[in-house]
Amino acid sequence: MKPSATYELLVDSVGEWDFTDGFVPCELLLVGEDAYPVLLSAEKQVLIAVSRYGKGKMVVISHEGIMKSSKFSQFLRNAVEWLKPSPAALVGSHHRLDSLSQLLLGAGIKVEAGVALSTHHGVYCMDAYDSTQAKDIVCFVKEGGGLLIGGQAWHWGSLHGKEKVLFEFPGNQVTSVAGVYFTGNPVAKGIFKVAKKIPKIPLTVPVGMFRPTFTQFKTTLEMEHLTSTLGWALPDSC
């Protein structure tokens, strides 16, 4: 499926993006060749993105609150259907996302709620705050699974150092393989219109935001970090 067709599927019947609830999302950084935005803020910061890794797909959301809100139910259903490797695929959901599980069950989607990732799942839904299964999840996606993941990294960055977010924030240990990163930059709330086509990311970035090319980022930093700091190398075969 072409990116334009994927985008149309993801935003089908989505009226608007209401980011006015009690959560503050973070900006997502896209460096992957297969990564592109679904939603930009008024300041052109990425709030929702999709990407591919191996045979699988990812939908990355800039705050887990979005995954728990009925305001986003149409988009979440669209996202899960796109992530499925087959129409009958079972969806697994982390125990911290019970609201999402109930939302999907109410839409008639088969969900195994409150569980860790398992080999019988076709899609897995999780927040970005736990890297316990990072290697397994990366392999899961590489082999054809779908991942729906959401979180914000600005709070983590305020505790551990904003400069550490790209390489040490738990969610980035998963999404980085697909060229998507949670950042420590908060995004202002608002109500955003659904773009008619894939929104374009401006070439200019805020001062202090590191935005390397995909090749530079992947070869000089990302692989070195995953091997030395996390203690495992990206497998050729899982």
Image (tube, helix red, strand yellow):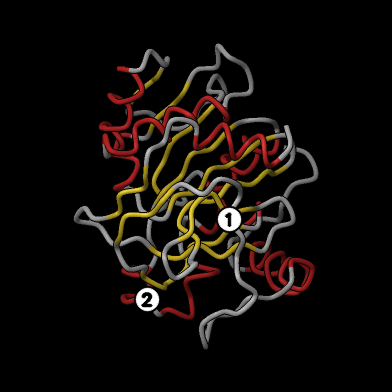
Residue sitting at the far left: 22
Could you say which is closer to the camera, residue 205 or residue 62?
A: 205
Q: In this view, does 4 lie above or below 195?
A: above
Amino acid residing under circle 1: Pro
* Residue at left offset 32%, top offset 68%: 188
* SS of the residue under disc 1: loop
Q: Where is residue 148 in the image (x, y as percent from the top left)?
A: 48, 39
* Residue at numbered disc 2: 160
Q: In which quarter of the image is residue 190?
A: bottom left
Left or right placement of residue 234 versus residue 99 in this view: right
Q: Are marks 2 and 1 in contact (CB under 8 Å)?
A: no
* Residue at left offset 79%, top offset 68%: 215
* Residue at numbered disc 1: 199
Amino acid residing under circle 2: His
Q: Position of residue 176 (x, y in %)?
A: 61, 57
* Residue at left offset 48%, top offset 59%: 40
Could you say which is closer to the camera, residue 25 or residue 8?
A: 8
Left or right placement of residue 42 versus residue 190 in this view: right
Q: In this view, does 54 lie above or below 85?
A: below
Q: State the mark number for residue 17.
A: none
Residue density around tag 2, few if under 14, some if 14–19, many if 20 or more, within 10 Å: few
In space, the residues marked 2 and 1 are separated at their CA atoms by 32 Å
Q: Is residue 201 above or below residue 96?
A: below
Residue sitting at the far front: 196
Q: How many marks?
A: 2
* SS of the residue under disc 2: helix
Which circle, 2 or 1, is nearer the viewer? 1
Quadrant position of the C terminus in the picture: top right
Left or right placement of residue 133 versus residue 226 in this view: left
